[in-house]
Image (cartoon, helix red, strand yellow):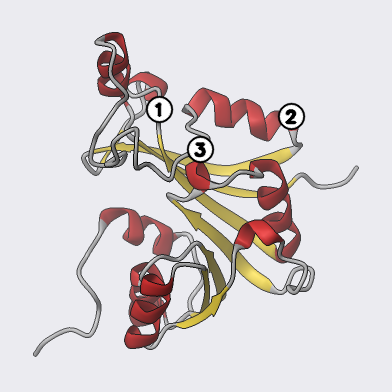
Amino acid sequence: MTSNIPKFRHDFAIIAGWLPFASKVLDLGCGDGALLEYLKASLEVRGYGVEKDDTNWLACMSKGVNVIQMDLEAGLSDFEDQSFDTVILSQTLQAVHNTEGIVREMLRIGREVIVTFPNFGYWRHRLQTLQGRMPVSKNLPYQWYDTPNVHLCTINDFDQFCINCNINVIERLVLTENQPITFLPNLLGNLAMYRLESMPKK
């Protein structure tokens, strides 16, 4: 018997492990809808995506993913406070201009937030930079001249960002080739995954 769950991706499975069953999820910059398709099949989430690219929007529609075609940079004021259990920004952080504004809006809209991004501090990226080249890797696949990335950051950068913005890190997981990295994560980790919430008011 063939499973209806889409092809396994380790980062998708980790995100699924951070979500309650049948929860309400908003995926910002959802691409072709693969994550929402996975979460719907594995957890029966009530998922909605935001995507501006025409091709990706059509791919979402073909998968039966609920998607709104809009530019998340234009603001998320149409979404009410705490209207989702979780808001996700999966490997899109580096491509947004107003990083702080979008993360704050995510925390307003969702009870929890999940953010994942490629770690620019990964040793292979550092090595390529020392060689005088912009890094290209599995998680940073673009050349310098066609990249959508505008704000590359390291794990240390994002940790400090959370401190500065009074954001509580519920859980952080750093991976390389799907393996968790606990020793020198800013140097040895390729992909950073964060589970966040607004800091409780005193």
Residue lying at the far right of the rendered structure: 202
Q: Nearer the viewer, residue 54 or 31?
A: 54
Foreground mark, 1 or 2, reads: 1
Crowding at mark 1 (Cα within 10 Å: few <14, some 14-19, many 20+): many
The type of residue carrying mark 1 is Phe
Can residue 22 be seen at all in this image of the molecule?
no
Give the number of the disc on residue 120: 1
Residue 43 versus residue 190 in the image, above or below = below
Q: Earlier in the sequence, mark 1 or mark 3?
A: 1
Quarter the N terminus occupies: bottom left
x and y percentages locating residue 42 in the rendered image:
34, 77
Q: How far is disc 3 from disc 2 in space, using C-alphas?
A: 21 Å
Quarter occupied by residue 105: bottom right
Foreground mark, 1 or 3, reads: 3
Q: Earlier in the sequence, mark 3 or mark 2?
A: 3
159 sits to left or right of 13: right
* Residue that mark 3 sits on: 150
Q: Nearer the viewer, residue 92 or 81?
A: 92
The type of residue carrying mark 2 is Asn
Q: How far is disc 1 from disc 3 in space, using C-alphas?
A: 12 Å
Crowding at mark 2 (Cα within 10 Å: few <14, some 14-19, many 20+): few
Crowding at mark 3 (Cα within 10 Å: few <14, some 14-19, many 20+): few
Q: What residue lies at 33% left-to-right and 24% top-to-bottom? A: 122
Residue 70 versus residue 91 in the image, above or below = below
* Residue that mark 2 sits on: 164
Residue 116 versus residue 25 in the image, above or below = above
- Per the image, label 2 sits on a secondary structure element best described as helix
Q: What residue lies at 35% left-to-right and 21% top-to-bottom? A: 183
